[in-house]
Image: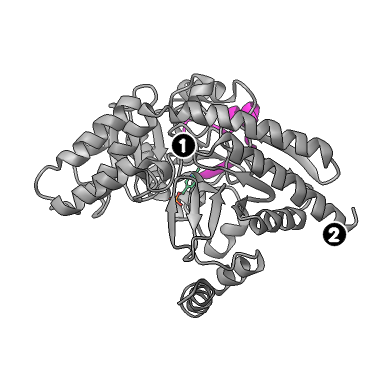
């Protein structure tokens, strides 16, 4: 079958068996090639059609697609033991946990591996309730933590919640970045404050300097835990190992996912202080997962963590992100009538348009030049750029050039 036939077959199968809305939207955006393979910063179609991956997962492919060290380790692990017996101790998981603990912020050193970011949040919420014996959570409006019931209850966009009410009780939402609102909301019944250090799906919102430090102080004063969701911001993405490093703040529990699997395996984790780990004192099986922490995923995580350090992924994200941000700011200066803001940290950059339809047209323009990106889930006015750290300066310059052209074409098309 040629590439066009593969796309049509895949499109029909999505329509019939997966999700017709996704199929239609993909076609509408001009993405009429099915994915076939990937390498570095590129995703390829069946006939080698090369797409520069500026969505990057989002946040999954920080060390690039199919990093050779991760792939080699996985092939080896597949020949040894892909899944755990759940009876004998697993040295692969033990090694991965030690490595996570070695780079985790502050005193977070006990690790529970799961399969996704949402599961990491579920575990963190359960741990906070169990450890503090308190019911409440304070979270941020517009925040995104995943779509399972607990994670969804913590998230802050109604459109994803309304159909699934009633959600979990005990969740209060306050404006992100507003320390006074946080101080008012956190009380003696608060188990934890749960925040993203930078709100990703809300359109790459960087909070004011000092906000996380104040959140830490508020939690300490009220006996609540601080949970930071670094599922998307973690492991170098923002130019530091953790986004909370920018503020010199460390949480009681950190949630990880996405890039932890080295762009090759699904894995999440919540990592907490020794004090919080009293949750397992009475019953070591109080929180479990059949596939969580399986040898394939942990092997990928172990190697990915080595790569993040050895290849200075945070440094690359800082340097290339600065170039991307500066370029996008120039484009915004030229198209001030349609671009409202450009913001971000490291290779986590958001361009906010004045209207979601304009954002969509610009995304389609990028796709036409085979650059992949998408809008932020909780803020469709924002086009986000989260390419792998292996993207080159030349490729970044090309993205900026295409963005300029796509913005110009959109302005002309709409007569603005
Ligand atoms: N937390 C954050 C900050 C996220 O960005 C996401 C996913 O985008 C999640 C949690 C949920 O992760 P997953 O989709 O792996 O469940």
The residue closer to the viewer here, 89 or 385, is: 385
Instruction: Determine whether the beta carbon of the residue marked 2 sits less than 8 angstroms from the nearest atom of ligand 1.
Output: no
Q: Quick one: 45 or 266, which is closer to the camera?
A: 45
Q: Dividing the picture into quarters, in which one does residue 358 lie?
A: bottom right
Determine the CA span between mark 1 and mark 2: 39 Å
In the depicted view, which residue is nearer to us: 201 or 237?
237
* Residue visible at 55% across and 42% down in the picture: 386
**Mark 1 element type:** loop
Residue underneath mark 2: 413
Q: Where residue 203 sits in the image (x, y, percent)?
A: 64, 43
The span shown in magenta is 171-189
In the picture shown, does residue 78 fall above or below 392? below
The crowd level at tag 2 (other Cα within 10 Å; few <14, some 14-19, many 20+) is few
Which badge, 1 or 2, comes first in the chain's sequence? Answer: 1
Question: Is 347 contained in the magenta span?
Answer: no
Q: State the image coordinates of residue 11 (x, y, percent, origin top left).
A: 53, 75
The image position of residue 339, as x and y in percent, is 78, 43
Residue shown at 49%/54% (left/top)? Answer: 43
* Residue 269 x, y percent position in the rendering: 34, 41
Report the residue marked by disc 1: 230
Q: Residue furthest right?
A: 415
- Identify the secondary structure beneath mark 2: helix
Q: How is the image coloured?
A: one colour
Residue 190 in sight in this render: no
Under 8 Å from ligand 1: the CB of mark 1?
yes
**Label 1 neighbourhood size at 10 Å, few (<14), some (14-19), many (20+)?**
many
Q: Quadrant of residue 162?
A: bottom right
Q: Nearer the viewer, mark 1 or mark 2?
A: 2
């Amino acid at each position: 079958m040629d590439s066009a036939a593969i796309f049509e077959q895949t499109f029909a199968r999505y329509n019939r068996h997966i999700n017709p809305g996704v199929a239609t939207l993909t076609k509408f955006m001009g993405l009429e090639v099915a994915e076939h393979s990937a390498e570095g910063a590129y995703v390829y179609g069946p006939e080698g059609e090369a797409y520069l991956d500026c969505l990057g997962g989002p946040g999954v492919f920080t060390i690039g697609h199919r990093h050779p060290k991760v792939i080699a380790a996985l092939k080896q692990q597949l020949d040894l033991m892909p899944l755990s017996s759940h009876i004998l101790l697993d040295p692969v998981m033990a090694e991965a946990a030690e490595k996570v603990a070695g780079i985790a912020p502050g005193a977070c050193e006990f690790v529970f591996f799961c399969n996704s970011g949402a599961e990491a949040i579920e575990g963190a919420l359960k741990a906070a309730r169990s450890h503090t014996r308190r019911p409440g959570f304070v979270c941020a409006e517009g925040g995104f933590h995943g779509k399972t019931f607990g994670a969804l209850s913590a998230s802050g966009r109604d459109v994803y919640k309304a159909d699934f009410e009633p959600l979990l009780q005990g969740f209060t939402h306050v404006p992100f970045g507003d320390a006074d609102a946080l101080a008012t909301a956190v009380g003696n019944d608060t188990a934890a404050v749960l925040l993203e250090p930078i709100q990703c799906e809300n359109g790459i919102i960087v909070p004011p300097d000092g906000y996380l430090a104040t959140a830490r102080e508020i939690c300490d004063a009220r006996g609540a835990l601080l949970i930071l969701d670094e599922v998307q911001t973690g492991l170098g993405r923002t130019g530091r190992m953790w986004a909370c490093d920018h503020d010199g703040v460390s949480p009681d529990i950190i949630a990880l996912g996405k890039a932890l699997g080295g762009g090759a395996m699904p894995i999440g984790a919540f990592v907490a202080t020794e004090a919080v780990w009293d949750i397992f004192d009475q019953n070591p099986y109080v929180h479990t997962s059949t596939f969580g922490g399986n040898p394939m995923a942990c092997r990928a995580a172990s190697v990915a963590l080595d790569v993040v350090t050895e290849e200075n992924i945070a440094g690359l994200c800082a340097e290339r992100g600065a170039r991307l941000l500066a370029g996008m700011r120039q484009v915004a200066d030229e198209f001030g009538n349609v671009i409202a803001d450009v913001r971000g940290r490291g290779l986590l950059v958001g361009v906010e348009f004045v209207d979601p339809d304009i954002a969509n047209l610009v995304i389609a323009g990028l796709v036409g030049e085979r650059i992949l990106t998408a809008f932020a889930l909780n803020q469709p006015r924002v086009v986000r750029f989260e390419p792998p750290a292996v993207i080159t300066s030349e490729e970044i310059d090309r993205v900026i050039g295409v963005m300029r052209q796509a913005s110009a074409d959109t302005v002309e098309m709409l007569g603005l």
